[in-house]
């Protein structure tokens, strides 16, 4: 349910009119956040950021935010913090399918990150989608964050994206980071940065923020690093495949 009379995507269209944004004119994320803070202060910064992506025709992660043809073709993203109005005559066609976005969704590895097998990206998306539908495997009552058509899959936090943002049965936030191969201690810094962003910009007073790291193998240095952090849990996942015989012609 929208917090105000209109959903956020409609408020974005109202903002464009209110700011008298002209074709080719640049709009910054800071301007958008300031407009919402002034007009609709109950809308959270994470929701605003996610809607900017949802309404940007060239943003690969818009598929995670239930973008709708034509209705959500409002902006063209120039970089992580700047946008302009979408121009159908000048700009590429909006991204709408997984096939269009598969390559664009692949992000460059962070500095010093271990090389992973070529199929790691595809595995991570499969793991992400599976866990988003089965968060109870992590703990009972855990469920995907959702607000105003925005879900916690690839939730935007300061120019980066949380793999899965969830809420526990006590309505506290849980930040879930996935590593399809081995989890190293450097992921702790990434996770803590995401947790701090959620605590600062998303959580209500009194809401806790916890972290979860899920990897195929948890390294000893990661175990050691997390032994000093009470609000971070570690999990190793294992995949299994079963075969069912089929009788030809039956």
Image: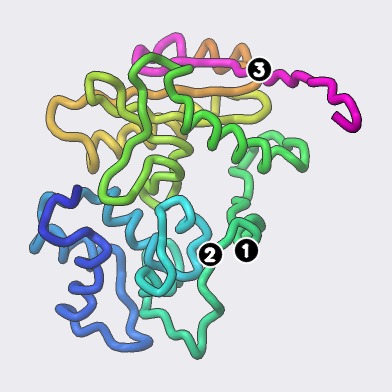
Q: Of callouts 3 and 2, which one flags the residue occurring earlier in the amino acid sequence?
A: 2
Badge 1 is on which residue? 100
Nearest to the observer: residue 89 or residue 241: 241
Q: Position of residue 61 (x, y in %)?
A: 49, 55
Magenta span contains residue 103: no
Instruction: Identify the mark at residue 96; answer none if there is no mark.
Output: 2
Q: Is residue 161 left or right of residue 49?
A: right
157 with respect to 183 (left or right): left
Seen from the viewer's position, the closer of residues 179 and 149 is: 149
Residue 37 left/right relative to 172: left
Residue 33: x %, y % from top left: 21, 60
Residue 75 showing in the rendered view: no
**Secondary structure state at the residue bearing disc 1:** helix
Residue name at image x 38 percent, y 35 percent:
165
In space, the residues marked 3 and 2 are separated at their CA atoms by: 32 Å
Residue range of the region highlighted in magenta in the rendering: 226-250
Q: Quadrant of residue 202?
A: top left
| Residue occupied by mark 3 | 238
Tell me which colouring the rendered structure shows. rainbow
């Amino acid at each position: 349910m929208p917090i105000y009379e209109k959903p956020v995507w409609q408020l974005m269209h109202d903002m464009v009119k209110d700011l008298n944004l002209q074709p080719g004119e640049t709009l910054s994320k800071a301007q958008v956040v300031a407009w919402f803070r002034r007009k609709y202060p109950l809308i959270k910064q994470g929701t605003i950021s996610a809607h900017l992506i949802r309404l940007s025709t060239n943003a690969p992660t818009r598929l995670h935010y239930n973008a709708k043809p034509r209705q959500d073709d409002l902006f063209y993203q120039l970089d992580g913090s700047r946008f302009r109005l979408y121009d159908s005559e000048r700009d590429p066609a909006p991204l709408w399918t997984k096939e269009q976005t598969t390559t664009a969704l692949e992000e460059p590895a962070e500095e010093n990150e271990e090389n992973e097998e070529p199929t790691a990206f595809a595995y991570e998306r499969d793991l992400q989608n599976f866990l988003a539908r089965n968060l109870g495997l992590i703990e009972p009552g855990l469920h995907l964050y959702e607000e105003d058509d925005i879900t916690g899959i690839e939730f935007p936090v300061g120019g980066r994206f949380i793999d899965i943002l969830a809420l526990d049965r006590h309505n506290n936030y849980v930040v879930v980071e996935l590593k399809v191969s081995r989890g190293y201690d450097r992921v702790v810094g990434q996770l803590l940065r995401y947790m701090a962003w959620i605590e600062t910009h998303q959580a209500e007073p009194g809401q806790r923020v916890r972290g979860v790291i899920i990897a195929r193998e948890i390294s000893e240095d990661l175990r050691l690093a997390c032994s000093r952090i009470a609000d971070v849990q570690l999990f190793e996942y294992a995949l299994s495949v079963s075969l069912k015989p089929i009788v030809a012609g039956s």
